[in-house]
Every structure is written in structure tokens, then in C-alpha cells.
Amino acid sequence: MIFVTVGTHEQQFNRLIQKVDELKRDGYIKEDVFMQIGYSTYKPQYCQWQYMISYDEMLQNVKKARIIITHGGPASFILPLQEHKIPIIVPRQEKYNEHINNHQVEFVHFVEEKQKNIIIVDNIDDLRDVLEDYDSFICQMNQEIVSHNESFNVEFEKIMKNLL
């Protein structure tokens, strides 16, 4: 299954929703697709969808999905990483009236450069090729999410002991 989520941002993300629906219609996507379309005005005709879903439904869809396609909101792409899955990220872009600026584009490229554990699709026309080559992409990638909480706590404890 492929799970697509655009989060809860109040602007549409028709570019992503329509492209996935067309890929399903044209037979490039063979497996089932479920989409959370948020405030998008395009209504998929070839994929199952809902406007919004609960966190529990989101988690179940991420666990069940072979591929997760998401916008560039951190909460939406960190969850798949926590489940040891490499998300495909299509960041929202200002020029398509999907967000108020291009911070998602900038942020996901920063994360990709540092962590090497996400796949970014800036040009929606590249999505088909990325889906076709998904398995070969993920074989070369870091599938772990890095947390620095433990090292932070150790250092913080040292500082506190020195102060006391």
C-alpha cells in the first residue's frame, strides 16, 4: 500500500494529490493508495481518501504502507522514519499557493544533506520515476532516525554537577 499525507496546513496541495491519482489511473501505481488530502480541493477518483485522519489512523497507515509520500512538514516525515521507513517528500511550494513561503523546500534539503534518510521530489513530474525506483533508492540510504537526547542528558548532568 502507498500512504499519502499532506498534513493539516490550511492551504491546498492539489499538485501532489492529483499527480498520485493520475499515476494510479494510468497504471503506474499498481498497489492500493490511501490519501489524507487535508484542505486540497482536488478529490481523487482512483484512490481512497479522507480530508483528515486521527493520529492513530496516521500511525496505522504508516505502519501498513510500503511507501509513504508526504509534504515537507517535520511531523509528517519523522513518523515514517521512526517506523524505519524512508519517506518520499514533496515539499509544498509558494509558487503553487501551497504555503506562504518555501521553508519546506529549504528544510527538507537541509535534513537530506545531514541525515541522508529521505527522498525529495521537488519536481512533481519526477514522482513516477522515484516510485518506480523506490526499492533501489532505499537500499542505499540510512534508515535510522538519529536522536541526540541521551548525549544531551549526559552533558547536561555533568554541567549540573559542576554547578552544585
Image (spheres, rainbow, N blue to C red):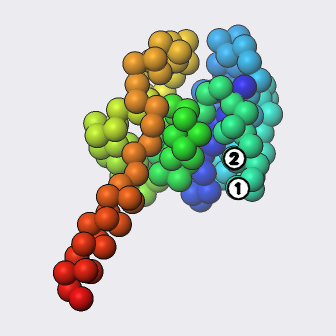
Under tag 2, what secondary structure? Answer: helix
Quadrant of the rendered image containing residue 29: top right
Q: Residue at x 55, y 32 (%)?
A: 85
Circle 1 packing at 10 Å, graded few (<14), some (14-19), many (20+), is few
Q: Is residue 163 left or right of residue 98?
A: left
| Rendered view: 163 above or below 99 | below
Comparing 87 with 159, the one in front is 159
| Rendered view: 143 above or below 138 | below
Q: The N terminus lies in which quarter of the figure?
A: top right
* Mark 1–mark 2 distance (CA, rounded to whole Å): 6 Å
Contact between marks 1 and 2 (CB within 8 A): the answer is yes
Q: Residue at x 40, y 30 (%)?
A: 142
Under tag 1, what secondary structure? Answer: helix
- The answer to whether one can see residue 12 in this image is no
Residue 140: x, y in percent? 40, 19
Comparing 163 with 16, the one in front is 163
Q: The C terminus lies in which quarter of the figure?
A: bottom left
Q: Which mark is residue 149?
A: none
Q: Is residue 140 left or right of residue 6?
A: left
Residue 62: x, y in percent? 66, 39
Residue 129: x, y in percent? 49, 14
Q: Residue at x 35, y 66 (%)?
A: 153
Q: Which mark is residue 55?
A: 1
Residue 143: x, y in percent? 46, 31
Amino acid type, residue under disc 1 in the picture: Tyr
Quadrant of the rendered image containing residue 120: top left
Q: Number of marks in the image?
A: 2
Find disc 2 in the rendering and name its residue.
Answer: 59
Q: Residue at x 52, y 18 (%)?
A: 134
Quadrant of the rendered image containing residue 17: top right
Q: Is residue 103 left or right of residue 27?
A: left
| Rendered view: 123 above or below 140 | below
